[in-house]
Image (cartoon, grey):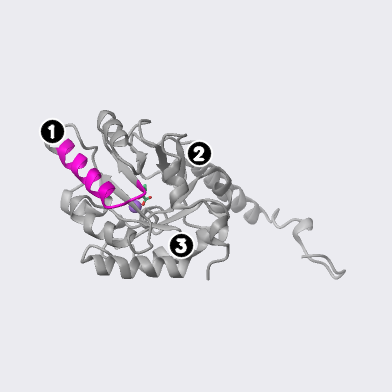
């Protein structure tokens, strides 16, 4: 069940209305406590299928299931009050047909109470984006580098330097825009192309590795917090460096347990009643 009245949160329409007004602030979130910390600062929280890599330790997002996305979507909804919550449709949950896309997107909307879904793809997904957005499911597109295609493309690299690549991304963005997406992630794309696309579209463009010329920005929160440090693409900035702090905390804890200096008297119950 949804826990907040619908109108309290930022809506898809109000995200799109920020285009041309001010940059849109977005981060990924996967858990209730982190969502609670990010919510006051973000217009939109994306429950990304990057959860597969940063939380589950998968090699790519391809293994993420609809059930995982729903569970994390519910957690982020419980932890937040104001942001527009967008949940990624995972690989295999929408590519088959517009009907499959609607069925699974509707399940996400019903079971999480989120405001919108996101799906990867260009021209080939335009029909599905139109089908969903005409039937009550606001859609965020995702063009440029599409991580769910990693098995077909063979890796992750920035795109748009050749005319062929630039034309493809341009056509993809226009098709998803015409299909009615209210926003669109542009990932791993050169600045001039991101600038041109952002100027051309009705949808608000949300860049990741796509320059400051986009209408807003998103980062994977575990990347920007310096928790996920397996690799750092050029577009990631560590706004915090939590990995060494977590390691140090674990080391300090281990040392105190071995020395029996933790737990100390203040952490210990005695015969006299004490509060929990
Ligand atoms: O899964 C994800 O986190 C994303 C964003 C990086 C756009 O798709
Ligand atoms: Na994603």
Mark 2 vs 1, N-terminal side: 1
Q: Is residue 220 above or below residue 2?
A: above
Residue designated by label 1: 163
Residue ID at (78%, 56%): 266
Q: In which quarter of the image is residue 234?
A: top left
| Residue placed most toward the observer, 65 or 74 | 74
87 sits to left or right of 270: left
**Outermost residue toward the front in this view:** 134
Separation of disc 3 and disc 1 at Cα? 39 Å
Horizontal and vertical percent position of residue 38: 54, 47
Q: Can residue 251 be seen from the camera position used here?
A: no
Query: In terms of secondary structure, what is the magenta stretch mainly?
Result: helix
Separation of disc 2 and disc 3 at Cα? 24 Å
Q: What stretch is highlighted in magenta?
A: 165-183
| Residue placed most toward the observer, 262 or 59 | 59
Separation of disc 2 and disc 1 at Cα? 38 Å
Q: Nearer the viewer, mark 3 or mark 1?
A: 1
Residue designated by label 2: 241
Q: Can residue 239 be seen from the camera position used here?
A: yes
Q: Residue 244 carries which label?
A: none
Residue designated by label 3: 72
Label 2: which secondary element: loop
């Amino acid at each position: 069940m949804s826990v907040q009245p619908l109108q309290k949160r930022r809506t898809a329409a109000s995200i799109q209305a920020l285009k041309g007004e001010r940059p849109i602030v977005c981060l990924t979130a996967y858990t209730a406590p982190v969502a609670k910390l990010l919510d006051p600062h973000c217009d939109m929280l994306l429950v990304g299928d990057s959860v597969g890599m940063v939380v589950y330790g998968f090699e790519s997002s391809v293994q993420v299931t609809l059930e995982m996305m729903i569970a994390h979507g519910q957690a982020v909804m419980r932890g937040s009050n104001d942001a527009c919550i967008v949940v990624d449709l995972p690989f295999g949950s929408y590519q088959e047909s517009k009907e499959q896309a609607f069925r699974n997107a509707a399940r996400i909307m019903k079971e999480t109470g989120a405001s919108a879904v996101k799906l990867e793809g260009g021209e080939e997904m335009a029909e599905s984006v139109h089908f969903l957005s005409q039937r009550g499911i606001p859609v965020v597109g995702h063009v440029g580098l599409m991580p769910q295609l990693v098995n077909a493309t063979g890796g992750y690299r920035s795109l748009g330097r050749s005319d062929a690549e630039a034309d493809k991304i341009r056509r993809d963005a226009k098709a998803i825009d015409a299909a009615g997406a209210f926003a669109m992630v542009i990932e791993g794309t050169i600045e001039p192309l991101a600038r041109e696309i952002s100027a051309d579209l009705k949808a608000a463009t949300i860049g990741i590795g796509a320059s400051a010329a986009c209408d807003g920005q998103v980062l994977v929160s575990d990347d920007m917090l310096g928790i996920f440090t397996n690799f750092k693409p050029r577009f990631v900035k560590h706004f915090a460096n939590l990995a060494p702090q977590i390691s140090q905390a674990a080391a300090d804890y281990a040392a105190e347990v071995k020395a029996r200096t933790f737990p100390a008297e203040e952490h210990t119950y005695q015969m006299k009643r004490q509060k929990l």
